């Protein structure tokens, strides 16, 4: 059977599944789709990734957000075979030798989680391994990272989820070595079975000692590998980012990727008003969800310090009178002076703040589904912007702060909407489309990783991340912006990633962080034109084809 026939056969099976599950609950349908893709991954990796690449718009919501959250919640029941490596706190002192159990001689990309804050779902413990697996599938499909050179990792440091502590199906994890030979249905396993930690999460220095040893082990074996931290509890996300970013080539997508996508969207919102990007400094931005604000402080540095932000947490508006503020959040606290809005007090509600500030942008990072309710959205109608922008960035879909239908109904058809999870476009009263832009980190993290890898960057700097965000913001044409389109179609993700990767690589060279890769010296990269750099990055992307069983003579 030819590759094309195998491809058609799978697509037909998938469409049959869609037909046969009509009328079933969305969660049942989503998990059924994930299962059929996962089975294909198990038996034919090459075909699996070709299917993903060719149909990424349809399959990204299955392998990535929002379905991956549902998968993690049910992972102990869905588990069929190990994929990736698990390190537990009980492995302390052994990680340096354990890392050499992985059979791949070279690893380019690692995604690691401790399962403590899976999307907006909270602590899912070792079941969070679905996140690194899904992220690395995106790296392969979007950035062309060779699937033989990726490694999903779970750090098991316990869980504070009482339900999981009592779950007998979640009793074991596998410290696994798994190697899938492309085109051949053979798998080599070398693993030892051990109990999953049935204990509360480690904290403080005990926790950091485990992560320290893991990072040292990875760097010792694969010093050029990029490590992406994913879905760590925010206090550890910021702590580990500051602890490792100057020592290793790593980044945290929840902190830095979210900030980059938000920045690209904010710049697009300025363009949607028909104003130059320089007017970003005049934008008033209300942010709900202080937990991620430290990661977005670079956005504030583009404007007038942090005076254009009004930040709220569960206790309302944050002002300088708030006690025991995290220093990273304190910079956004409102104070006193001519730039302050009259009668806005500590703890003011979201509705109060929106009514009095009349913001250009309402940015949701809260993880609280529906917090942008009818009253809040109607208050946004009085925005000082001709095109009020509402960003519901929380994942998965159930945690989105609002829906596009709510926005276009209550704010008005002139509004601009973006969300972290996918929604369908809305048909407006005049027959036009109201665009449900997906402001997903998928637009940036594959390019950040690929650009850092191809440039041989020692570290991933703020300048490299800023270059990625500006590249994404510039990708959309003025005509598209006027229609309310802030982000490109996911269908173009490989081309987007090539552009973003090239921008990141050039920024690494400009900052003298690039050490090059085996086939390209940093000096050669510096001499390339922008278009030549994009072409080079695109050529380096892996593409799934069957290798010949017999070499041509």
Image: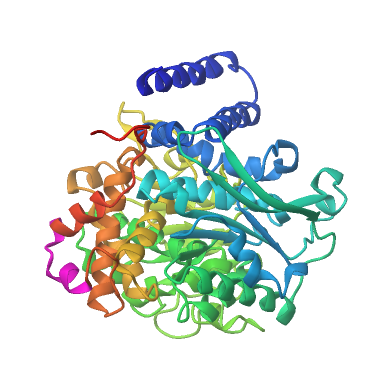
Residue 497 locus on image (x, y percent): 31, 52
Instruction: Estimate the x, y position of residue 481 in percent, counting from the top left.
Output: 25, 47
Q: Position of residue 275 (x, y in %)?
A: 21, 59
Q: Is residue 526 magenta?
A: yes
Say which of 228 and 95 sits in front. Answer: 95
- Residue 541 among magenta residues: no
**Residue 267 appears in which quarter of the rendering?**
bottom left
Front residue of 149 and 339: 149
- Report whether residue 442 is seen: yes
Q: Main secondary structure of the magenta part?
A: helix
Q: Quadrant of the C terminus?
A: top left
Residue at image position (82%, 65%) is 200
Q: Which residues are magenta?
A: 522-531
348 displayed left or right of 342: right
Residue 71, located in which quarter of the rendered image? Answer: top right
Q: Position of residue 168 (x, y in %)?
A: 86, 45
Q: Disc count in the image?
A: 0
Relative to 7, residue 323 above or below: below
* Side of 2 relative to 235 (left or right): left
Residue 345, can we see it?
A: no
Which residue does the image show at 46% across and 40% down from the upper left?
404
Q: Residue 483 sits in which quadrant?
A: top left
Instruction: Using the image, determine if residue 11 lies above or below residue 266.
Output: above
Q: Nearer the viewer, residue 233 or 94?
A: 94
- Identify the image quadrant of the N terminus: top left
- Give the residue at x 65% y 65%: 98
């Amino acid at each position: 059977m030819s590759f094309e026939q195998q491809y058609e056969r799978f697509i037909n099976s998938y469409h049959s599944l869609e037909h046969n599950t009509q009328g079933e609950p969305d969660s049942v349908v989503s998990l059924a789709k994930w299962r059929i893709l996962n089975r294909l991954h198990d038996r034919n990796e090459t075909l699996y990734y070709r299917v993903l690449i060719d149909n990424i718009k349809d399959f990204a919501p299955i392998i990535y957000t929002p379905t991956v959250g549902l998968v993690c919640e049910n992972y102990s029941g869905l588990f069929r075979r190990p994929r990736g490596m698990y390190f537990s706190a009980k492995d302390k002192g052994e990680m340096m030798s354990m890392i050499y159990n992985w059979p791949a001689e070279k690893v380019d990309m690692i995604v690691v989680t401790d399962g403590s804050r899976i999307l907006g779902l909270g602590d899912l413990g070792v079941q969070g391994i679905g996140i690194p697996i899904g992220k690395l599938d995106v790296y392969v499909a979007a950035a062309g990272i060779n699937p033989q050179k990726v490694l999903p990792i779970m750090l098991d440091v316990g869980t504070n989820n009482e339900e999981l502590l009592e779950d007998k199906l979640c009793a074991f994890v596998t410290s696994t070595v798994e190697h899938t030979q492309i085109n051949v249905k053979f798998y080599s396993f070398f693993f030892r079975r051990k109990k999953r930690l049935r204990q509360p999460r480690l904290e403080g220095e005990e926790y950091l000692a485990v992560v320290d040893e893991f990072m040292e082990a990875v760097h010792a074996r694969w010093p050029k590998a990029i490590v992406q931290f994913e879905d760590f509890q925010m206090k550890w996300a910021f702590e580990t980012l500051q602890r490792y970013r100057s020592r290793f080539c790593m980044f945290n997508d929840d902190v830095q990727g979210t900030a980059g996508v938000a920045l690209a969207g904010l710049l697009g919102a300025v363009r949607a008003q028909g104003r130059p990007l320089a007017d970003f400094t005049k934008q008033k931005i209300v942010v709900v969800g202080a937990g991620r604000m430290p990661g977005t402080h670079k956005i504030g540095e583009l404007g007038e310090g942090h005076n254009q932000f009004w930040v709220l947490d569960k206790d309302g508006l944050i002002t300088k009178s708030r006690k025991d503020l995290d220093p990273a959040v304190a910079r956004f606290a409102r104070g006193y002076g001519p730039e302050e809005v009259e009668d806005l007090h500590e703890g003011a509600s979201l509705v109060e703040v929106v009514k009095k500030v009349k913001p250009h942008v309402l940015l949701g990072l809260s993880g609280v589904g529906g917090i942008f309710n009818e009253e809040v959205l109607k208050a946004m109608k009085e925005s000082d912007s001709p095109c009020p922008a509402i960003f519901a960035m929380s994942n998965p879909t159930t945690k989105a702060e609002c829906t596009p239908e709510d926005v276009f109904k209550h704010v008005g058809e002139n509004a601009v909407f973006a969300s972290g999870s996918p929604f369908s476009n809305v048909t407006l009263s005049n027959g036009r489309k109201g665009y449900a832009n997906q402001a997903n980190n998928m637009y940036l993290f594959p390019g950040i990783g690929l650009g850092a890898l191809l440039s041989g960057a020692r570290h991933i700097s703020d300048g490299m991340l800023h270059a990625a965000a500006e590249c994404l913001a510039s990708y959309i044409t003025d005509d598209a912006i006027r229609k309310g389109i802030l982000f490109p179609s996911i269908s173009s993700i490989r081309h987007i990633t090539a552009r973003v990767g090239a921008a990141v690589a050039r920024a690494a060279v400009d900052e003298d962080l690039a050490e090059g890769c085996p086939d390209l010296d940093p000096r050669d990269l510096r001499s390339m034109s922008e278009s030549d750099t994009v072409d080079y990055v695109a050529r380096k992307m892996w593409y799934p084809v069957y290798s010949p069983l017999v070499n041509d003579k």
